[in-house]
Image (spheres, rainbow, N blue to C red):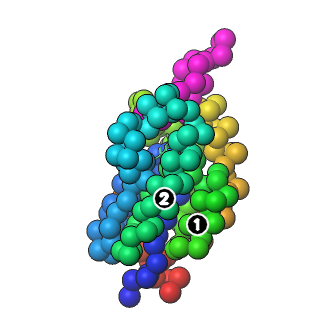
Amino acid sequence: MKPRRHIFLIGFSGSGKSTLGRVLATKLEYRFIDLDAVIEEYARQSVSEVFAKKGEAAFRRLEKAQLERVLGSTRIQVIALGGGAFESADIRRIARCNGVTIFLNCSQRELYRRLRNVGNRPLLEVKPRPNETPTQAKMRRIRHLFKKRLANYRTADLILSTTGKSVAQSAGRLVQLLMGLL
Ligand code: S3P
């Protein structure tokens, strides 16, 4: 038996939403949707370009509109939301009404390791303060955003820690958790 509702993966950048989402969708034979990729295709620009040229508020409007569009499909889908999507009360409501929400939790230390060399997350690009290294500045930003967002992430139906886990381990556990919901 498989869940007959959409599956929304939420969590901070680097928590494994896209990688795990793809594996989960294959296992369940559902379509996989990476909402950031959908936005990029629609805008014909990268997420970084949308942020730089139109600003964060415009990105957030696109995020909601594209989520609504994707949910117009009759197919059941595993949908990886962007790390900031759950800050929107509208998106939280839309996700809750349309399926199961899963928070992929991950330690900040591991998030930093995974995001250290990644340059396409505009909100993580911060100018170091005087006496601060670029590493410390990025850590500070991750800490700040993670703390701010945690309460909303925690409203998910299920929480799975991906810290120290392989994709295969997390995907297996995720399927078990989903079956337990039925
Ligand atoms: C964002 C996370 C990104 C992307 C955009 C904003 C955020 O998605 O939506 O850069 O606000 O944390 P990922 O979680 O896939 O990195």
Residue at position x 43%, y 31% from top? Answer: 49
Asked if the residues shown at circle 2 and circle 1 are in contact, with their CB atoms under 8 angstroms apart, the answer is yes
Residue at position x 29%, y 68% from top? Answer: 26
Which label's residue is closer to the chain start, 2 or 1? 2
Magenta part of the chain = 120-138
Callout 1: helix, strand or loop?
helix
54 left or right, relative to 2:
right
Instruction: Tell me the tag on residue 35.
Output: none
* Alpha carbon distance from label 2 to label 1: 9 Å
Of residues 92 and 113, the one drawn nearer to the viewer in this rendering: 92
Q: Residues within 10 Å of mark 2 (few under 14, many from 20)?
A: many
What residue did someone put label 2 on? 67
Instruction: Point out the residue furthest to the top here.
Output: 130
Residue at position x 38%, y 47% from top? Answer: 42
Q: Residues within 10 Å of mark 1 (few under 14, many from 20)?
A: some
Residue 56 lies in quadrant: top right
Q: Is residue 122 magenta?
A: yes
59 left or right, relative to 32:
right
Residue type for callout 2: Leu
List x then y, in percent, for residue 30.
Answer: 33, 72
Q: Is residue 23 visible?
A: yes
Q: For the image shown, how many numbered marks are present on the structure?
A: 2
Q: Is residue 18 visible?
A: no
What residue did someone put label 1 on? 94
List x then y, in percent, for residue 47.
Answer: 44, 38
Of residues 107 and 141, the one drawn nearer to the viewer in this rendering: 141
List x then y, in percent, for residue 64.
Answer: 54, 54
Residue type for callout 1: Ile
